[in-house]
Every structure is written in C-alpha cells, then in structure tokens.
Amino acid sequence: MKKLFLISAALFMAVTVTCAQNASDGKRFINKLVLDLEVSSGTKCDDMNPLTLGVNIGYKFIPRTYVFIHGANMFGHYDRNGTKTYINGANLGGGLAYVLIEDKDIDLELRGNVSAGLSDSWKNTSYDIGLMMKVKSGVTNINFGVSFRHINSHTAGIDSYNGAFFTIGFGI
C-alpha cells in the first residue's frame, strides 16, 4: 500500500511538472528563494494527536515548481487509558511543490514531502501530500494548508499515524 502511494505521488508530481510553465517575474536569485514557517496539527488517530513546528527552505528552479528542504519538530500527544503523555522528535527531509494557480493575490500549490526522524526517542518516516494556499501581502504571505500525512513509526510502543493535517504559517 505504501509503495503504491509513493509511486502514485511520484507519477502525479512528474506529470504536473511537465505542464506548461509561465514566465517568471523575477530572474534574480533572491526572487527564486522560498521560505515558509508553519505550525501543523493532525486529526486524532490511535489515541495520538500530532503537532508539528516546521520550516521549508526552497528554490524555484523553474517558474511554477520548486524543491525545498523540510525541517520539523514533531510532537505526538497521547491519551491512553486516562494517562496523558507526549513524545517528540526532530525530522529532516525534502519535498517538491508545484503552483497550480498563480494570481497576484493568491497562489494554490500542490506539495509533497518526505522526512525522517533524527532523534532516538521517536524514530519515524513521515510522508505528506497536500494543498497550500498562499495569500500574498507585499513580499510576505500567509499560508493555509490541508494535507494527508502518514507517519511510519519505527519505535516500539508508538503506533503509525494516518490522518488529515491542517497548517497555518507565513513565508516569503
């Protein structure tokens, strides 16, 4: 199932990238950089409510498509048998985004990313695909997103996660 999801996501992103590209308004290096700071929260699954604080640093190598490095600190809030606890871990990975709709006030992006846990307390691999709406205000923008995330936990006693994620953040 996971292989089918990854193959489908890769093919969809490959087809999307081959679509027609429009002309970029900025040819300078600084105009091609992308920086997003975000907070994401997921729906409850197997007694866990995940929360993520993340940053994406990217580069638009063609006008409507960019690659990015994704770094995040993930928290898994548990409520098992009346006992509330949490586990956290840092994740590092990368992704690809394609701007589906580009307007002077709003952009709508399709994003996918994969990241791996770096800490010993929560070893995991996270897969995420979703839509991000960027409301532009001068140089900065406010981001709103919805995505599907699969967190494959490699730590004993911590279940894997599948659920919807909702994101809010800002960027340049």
Image: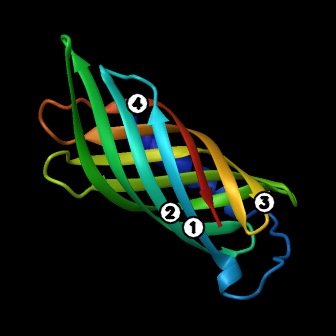
Q: How far apart are marks 1 and 3 (CA)?
A: 15 Å
Cβ atoms under marks 4 and 2 closer than 8 Å = no
Cβ atoms under marks 2 and 1 closer than 8 Å = yes
Q: Which of disc 3 and disc 4 is earlier in sequence?
A: 3
Q: What element carries label 1?
A: strand
Residue at 32% from the left image edge and 55% from the top image edge = 91
Taking the image as shown, residue 50 lies to the left or right of residue 163, namely left
Q: Callout 4: few (<14), some (14-19), or many (20+) C-alpha neighbours within 10 Å?
A: some
Of badges 3 and 2, the one in the foreground is: 3
Q: Distance between the residues labelled 4 and 3?
A: 34 Å
Q: Which amino acid type is shown beneath numbered disc 4?
A: Asn
Q: Callout 3: few (<14), some (14-19), or many (20+) C-alpha neighbours within 10 Å?
A: few
Q: Which residue matches tag 1?
A: 35
Q: Distance between the residues labelled 2 and 1?
A: 6 Å
Q: Which amino acid type is shown beneath numbered disc 3?
A: Ser
Spot occupied by residue 55 in the image (x, y as percentages of width and height): 47, 60
Residue 16 visible in the displayed image? no
Q: Which of disc 4 and disc 1 is earlier in sequence?
A: 1
Q: What element carries label 2?
A: strand
Q: How far apart are marks 1 and 4 (CA)?
A: 27 Å
Q: Which of disc 2 and disc 3 is earlier in sequence?
A: 2
Q: Which amino acid type is shown beneath numbered disc 2?
A: Asn
Q: Which of disc 3 and disc 1 is earlier in sequence?
A: 1
Q: Callout 2: few (<14), some (14-19), or many (20+) C-alpha neighbours within 10 Å?
A: some
Spot occupied by residue 62 in the image (x, y as percentages of width and height): 70, 75
Q: Which residue matches tag 4?
A: 162
Residue at 84% from the left image edge and 78% from the top image edge = 25
Position of residue 76 relative to residue 139, above or below, is above
Of badges 1 and 3, the one in the foreground is: 3
Q: Which residue matches tag 2?
A: 56
